[in-house]
Image: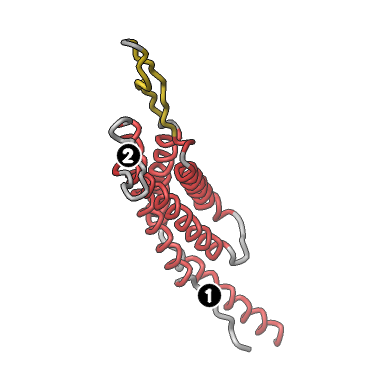
Amino acid sequence: MASLQTEAAAKAEVGEYNHLAVASPPTRKWRWGFVLVRLVASFATVSATLVMALNKESKSVVVATVGTAPLTATISARFQHTPAFIFFVVANGVATLHNWLMIALDIFGPDYRFHGFRLPTIAILDMTTVALASAGDGAATFMAALGKNGNKHARWNKICDKFSAYCDHGAGALIASFVGLCLLLLISAISIIKLLHKPRPSIASP
């Protein structure tokens, strides 16, 4: 008799847990919507990465005149010349890889058990990615403003009057990256909300 009561209590506990497990996760539509947001964010960051990484412009300028013959030199502007732009490319590349990994985890993750570490790990990685992308955008924006306006106090000349295409491409990369950063902030907020509302199965008291 006692064994039957114990078995019944165990079945009731399992049934309650399964009920919570079925009812608590977001609907399939909500989950795929979240995946779509990550996909759009990855498109924005990968666009910023590629545009900045391929950004270069070369021009021939007159450096001296010998008699009546001008001497010219070819000057190039590349993203590799500025450490802030290199960091920008790396930060957006990492953000892209992060979102692709999270998309794969959202699609295939339900088939695996993570022992309760899935949501906290995703929330931490999302916040880390936001911090990294924000730092890259800030550094690149500072250098872009310096290249466009110069700095009279430090006697740093502007370059956008000479390399207009280079600056236009850099501005496009920054716009795409800031769009991605806004979406990353939204993704991080959703991850934190999902973590805070994570259901906890109740254990039946003896």
Residue shown at 55%/73% (left/top)?
17
Quarter of the image containing the C terminus? bottom right
At a point 38% along the width and 16% down the height, the residue shown is 71
Q: Is residue 178 left or right of residue 1?
A: left
Left or right for 56, reference 110: left
Q: Which mark is residue 188?
A: none
Displayed quadrant of residue 112: bottom right
- In front: 121, or 182? 182
The three-letter amino acid code for the residue at tag 2 is Lys
Q: Quadrant of residue 176?
A: top left
Q: Which mark is residue 158?
A: 2
Residue drawn at 46 percent across, 58 percent down:
131
Picture quarter with the N terminus? bottom right
Q: Assess disc 1: are there few (<14), some (14-19) or many (≥20) residues with their C-alpha within 10 Å of its C-alpha.
A: few
Q: Whole-percent x and y of residue 134? A: 42, 55
On the image, the x and y values in percent for residue 11 come to 61, 75
- Can I make out residue 84 in this image? yes
Pointer 2 or 1: first along the chain: 2
State the SS at label 2. loop
Q: Amino acid at mark 1?
A: Arg
> In this rendering, is residue 54 above or below 137?
above
Q: Is residue 86 left or right of residue 63?
A: right
Question: Considering the numbered disc 1 on the image, is that residue within a helix, a strand or a loop?
Answer: loop
| Cα–Cα span, label 2 and label 1 | 58 Å
Q: Position of residue 198 (x, y in %)?
A: 49, 70
Which of these two is toward me, 122 or 21?
A: 122
Visible residue check, residue 100: no
Single out the residue that lies furthest toward the top.
68
Q: Which residue is mark 1?
A: 200
Find residue 116 and report its image quarter. Answer: bottom right
